[in-house]
Image (cartoon, grey):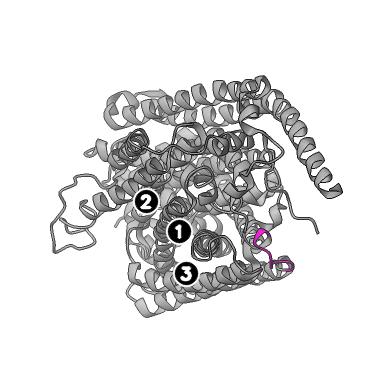
Amino acid sequence: MSLTSVLDTAAIHAAAPLSATLAEQTKENSWINILIFIGFVAVTMIVVFRASRNNNTAAEYYAAGRSFSGGQNGTAIAGDYLSAASFLGITGAIAVNGYDGFLYSIGFLVAWLVALLLVAELLRNTGKFTMADVLSFRLKQRPVRIAAATTTLVVCFFYLLAQMAGAGGLVSLLLGLDNSNKVGQNIVIAVVGVLMIVYVLIGGMKGTTWVQIIKAFLLIIGAAIMTIIVMAMHGFNLSTLMEAAVQTSINEGGAGQALLNPGAQYGKAPLDFISLALALVLGTAALPHVLMRFYTVPTAKEARKSVVWAIWLIGGFYIFTLVLGYGAGALIGKDAILAAPGGVNAAAPLLAFVVGGPVLLGFISAVAFATILAVVAGLTITAAASFAHDIYSNVIVKGEPKPEMEVKVARRTVIVIGLVAIGGGILANGQNIAFLVALAFAIAASANLPTILYSLFWKRFTTQGALWSMYGGLAAAIILIAFSPVVSGSEKAMIPGADFAWFPLANPGIVSIPLAFFLGWLGTVLDKNTEDPRIQAEMEVRSLTGVGAEKAVDH
Amino acid sequence: MGNPAQASQPGPVDFIAEQQSQEFRELRKSHRNFVFPVAIGFLAWYFAYVLLAAYAHDFMSIKVWGSLNIGLVMGLLQFVTTFGITTWYVSYANRKLDPQAAVIRARLETRIADDAAEKEEV
């Protein structure tokens, strides 16, 4: 590994190869990371405790009394959405693969227009706590609720697994643990899980929302500071920055000019990329933990404002990641990033160190860690609400739970999910985070989106159509993944020794999403039963006007 | 826990008549005439971009300014259109959708409140 002149400008006294130096430095300074992270936990814990009064009714526990403003909720949505996979993953992907990393962020952003135009407000007006409320509104309650709760739990599980799997790798980088130190990583995964259980148990949706707001604020500030420094180092000229990234790459004997062009990652598999793009753009508006956030505001208008805030914050952040990605490519270089502990995910933290020294590194590391905590908390409360509200209250006790019982069930579910997350995180430690997240998006887009859109916009839609679409989409997505090259058939696969990969694409979206739309249509036209037109009329009138929508809780 | 379907036992509001009312049909038309074409438009623009990035590498690699190429410019334009459509929709909803929805909501909520008051007197 050769040293480049860029290193001198970054003021690193480099006697050893850069990645080793950085790894050393990171290790020496890991106490700063830990200190800042403990500070974050302490502050958020205080906020969570203060927010936890009046947390005994379902509306308080799941929907924060519907008392957040659009701006607060939009910031929390950004906090929820800008997961470690987004921040570390996209920055790293741009640093290593150049333009193809940027493609991810575009899909993630444009997807919000689906939520804004077609879903958010109508869902806020017709539902109460969960996605299943909306899907089962005018269809047969029990079967549709069970199906919607199933897809909710599956999507949350994969998303959760991705975050927890990421925690292990991130920790090795941030706390200076060796990549091979699995025991140390597993302890940290368990600590994350326990902290998350405490947040969600005590704070409910209100506490979780505040954690996400604080985290979104810190993350966006941190990324903005780094972006400004990187741009200042390149004369506030994007073109100069990209040339510097190309130069570093040429010095390393890497892709060079090709870094700026599409094709470095997906050049040989364009169909795979299209499938991924489809899942990304259609998945967001069907992610249960995103949908549930719309119930924390008092009106549909505030739900609209939430999405607008989220779009501006998320869009702005992704523009920062473009600069940070090429900045890491220019100032650190692909080889040094890949050699660091944490690999491609290390690009953003290493860049923080190069441009801002150990304090900025500590800040960014602690924020990245807090990100995992906040996202995991959001997923957990969604899954717990879905189990307690959809399965327990509406199916097991048939809509007549004893008062307070539903929240009690939800709290117990939180503990179970927390333990499952810890176990799953330890087992999945080292798996590819981006793959698991893309899988969650593909499942959400296949299993949930067709039924959401049909039940909001298609009068004739029936229970059979909903069930075929949800179970069909879910099964198709999971089966295609199981027989994809990511699971078997190559050295890099999850099961490297076996080969049962007959499906050629890494992402199932291009097949499973159209299939789920088709099944929803087919199930409906073949259904001999029709649904009650009165309830359809009520749902449609309510969805557009907000008549009878759930109101904010008064104190 | 309220099962949403239970709320729709014959109540003070005849939702079928309401759904067929001139006022509501106009609201629905204003909503759908905006969201459907715009949704089709931005999805078409997004997939056009994705297909170009997947198959037209040479075209996307043409430099337009310094080291910025068509691919990057088109990618940044996706950001611009997303922000633009967001602002456009918000202004449309504030001007056209909210006032229409407010009229219907006020009328129906008065009816629901009157009905509840009557029941209390009985």
Residue A172 in the figure: left or right of residue B23 = left
> Upstream in the sequence, badge 2 or badge 1?
2
Q: Which mark is residue A333?
A: 2
- The lab-note entry on whether marks 2 and 3 share a chain reads yes
- State how far apart marks 2 and 3 are (Cα): 40 Å
Task: Give residue A39's quadrant in the image.
Answer: bottom right
Callout 1: few (<14), some (14-19), or many (20+) C-alpha neighbours within 10 Å? many
> How much space separates mark 2 and mark 1, taking CA atoms?
10 Å
Please report contact status of discs 2 and 3: CB closer than 8 Å, yes or no. no
Magenta range is: A53-59
**Secondary structure category for the residue under label 1:** helix
Q: Name the residue type under label 1.
A: Leu
Please say whether residue A168 is one of the residues in the magenta stretch: no
Tag of residue A417? 3
Towards the viewer: A551 or B16: B16
Task: State whether the magenta stretch is mostly helix, strand or loop.
Answer: loop
The amino acid sitting under disc 3 is Ile
What residue would you read off at disc 1? A350
Q: Is residue A199 visible?
A: no
Query: Relative to A353, does residue B57 appear above or below in the rendering?
Result: above
Instruction: Name which residue type carries label 2.
Output: Gly
